[in-house]
Amino acid sequence: MASSPTNTAAATPDTGSPVSTDLLIHLSALSLDTLEPTLANLSAAFSGQTVLVAMPEIAIPQIATSQTAGLGSVPSFANLRLLPYTPAAPSTTNWVLTASDYLNAYKLAQEHNASACLLLGPDSHTMQPESIRSLADATLSSSTDLVVSHYHLGPREGLVNSAILYPLTRALFCTKPRFPLATDLGLSLRMAERLATTAQRFTAANQQDALLWPASEATLAGYTIAETDIPTRITPHPTAADLNALLSQILGSFFTDIDAKAALWQRIRSVQPARTITEPPLPAEQIDVTPMLESFQLAYSNLHEIWALVLPPHTLLGLKRLSIMPPEAFRIADNLWARIVYDFILAYRLRTLNRSHLLGALMPLYLAWVASHLILIQSGVPPERHIEEVAQAFETDKPYFVSRWRWPDRFNP
């Protein structure tokens, strides 16, 4: 997969301190205006230690004009050794790690004999040096293969993750990274190799922007997973304004991954212990959920026949009650939401209807969940507590999903 290891020592300027190749830091989607703060944070995070930093070669001339063919130093950040690279599989996605990032990172880690690597995603300049160092220390632990960042987000942020990605990962794969699609990860070399092998199947098909799911890959391989807190970080936002297309991209990838690993998640059954939740004070602002509720009510009239192809009568009855519920009382029960998501995954697998149309039909239901969640937390319920309750509902109803997966005809609406 990777080219032969290169002799980096000859290319490193003699600064009196050896280059540590235990850890490779891979930067992706790096913009020129964030270059200097990113390097400043890395330099501070690894003060007194010389580290390898791989970055797209387009950024290198902006820092120093006298780069060597292999590694170069930056006078202002003398403990960093820059490794310019041309992506083996270029990506146009600039808000999340993609197949190309995993493939590039592993190639570089192997070429330079690194034992582990950090993948820092877009806008990583907003991470504090202490957070970067914490992520690195956890990654270099001999007992950990995958370190996933745990971000501290506001109540309106990361709701696709809270509503679907986190509960499903926890229920099906019995592991509970709060952000399964985190943009900052630590990988052991064997974890990097596994993800690169998976990524290569996508890049070989010219799907460089494909999303990968590290937590499920680690679970399948029997590798260890840990989390580290990232208290301060601006999470990158997709440039696409089409929420429907974005949701289809994320959920289409995730549902496909669930289908591919069905033999694994049907075997394991474990309820994860509850998280220790420390809730920050809630903001005083009130969020207008009226457009989301109107979208759901309109969809109930227009999409009812499509939903009837996917959802059983009991669920449809629950949606009917929701469609006439006053806004102040609007609340999607956690077990109802869990079964809606499970039934849509099954329909995605069975191709009950066109997958793009199917995921589009899920959108107003997701917006209804968001409205319900926001109404709930504005009533004083801590958001993380509710998200934990949602995850527990997914765990409780996993047998329902397994039964429908194995015998779908028995449960046809």
Image (cartoon, rainbow, N blue to C red):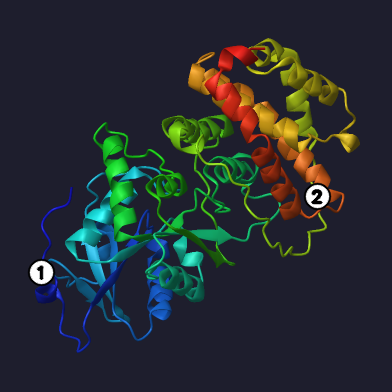
Q: Amino acid at mark 1?
A: Asn
Relative to residue 389, is residue 248 drawn left or right? left
| Among the two numbered marks 2 and 1 on one chain, the one whose residue lies closer to the N terminus | 1
The reply, left or right, for residue 275 in relation to residue 247 is right
What is the CA distance from the residue labelled 2 to the residue labelled 1?
Answer: 56 Å
- In the rendered image, which residue does mark 1 sit on? 7
Rendered position, 159 above or below 259 = below
Local packing at callout 2 (Cα closer than 10 Å; few below 14, some 14-19, many 20+) is some
Residue 286 seen: no
Q: Residue furthest bottom?
A: 16
**Residue 152 percent coordinates (x, y):** 62, 61
Tag 2–tag 1 contact (CB < 8 Å): no
Dividing the picture into quadrants, the one containing residue 114 is: bottom left
Q: Residue furthest top?
A: 305
Q: Is residue 126 visible?
A: yes
Instruction: Estimate how packed mark 1 is, as few (under 14), some (14 to 19) or many (20 or more) residues with alpha carbons within 10 Å.
Output: few
The one nearer the camera, 214 or 324, is 214
Q: At 67% from the left edge and 44% from the top edge, which residue is drawn?
A: 391
* Residue that mark 2 sits on: 377
Identify the residue at image location x=12%, y=73%: 11
Amino acid bearing label 2: Ile
SS class, disc 2: helix
Left-right relation of 382 to 252: right
- Residue 300: horizontal and vertical position, in percent? 75, 18
**Percent from the top left, x then y, of residue 406?**
53, 22
Residue 328 falls in image quadrant = top right
Q: Give the vertical position of 142 relative to 295 (above or below).
A: below
Point out residue 66 in the picture as x, y percentages from the top left corner: 17, 73
Q: Quadrant of the C terminus?
A: top right
Q: Nearer the viewer, residue 147 or 322?
A: 147
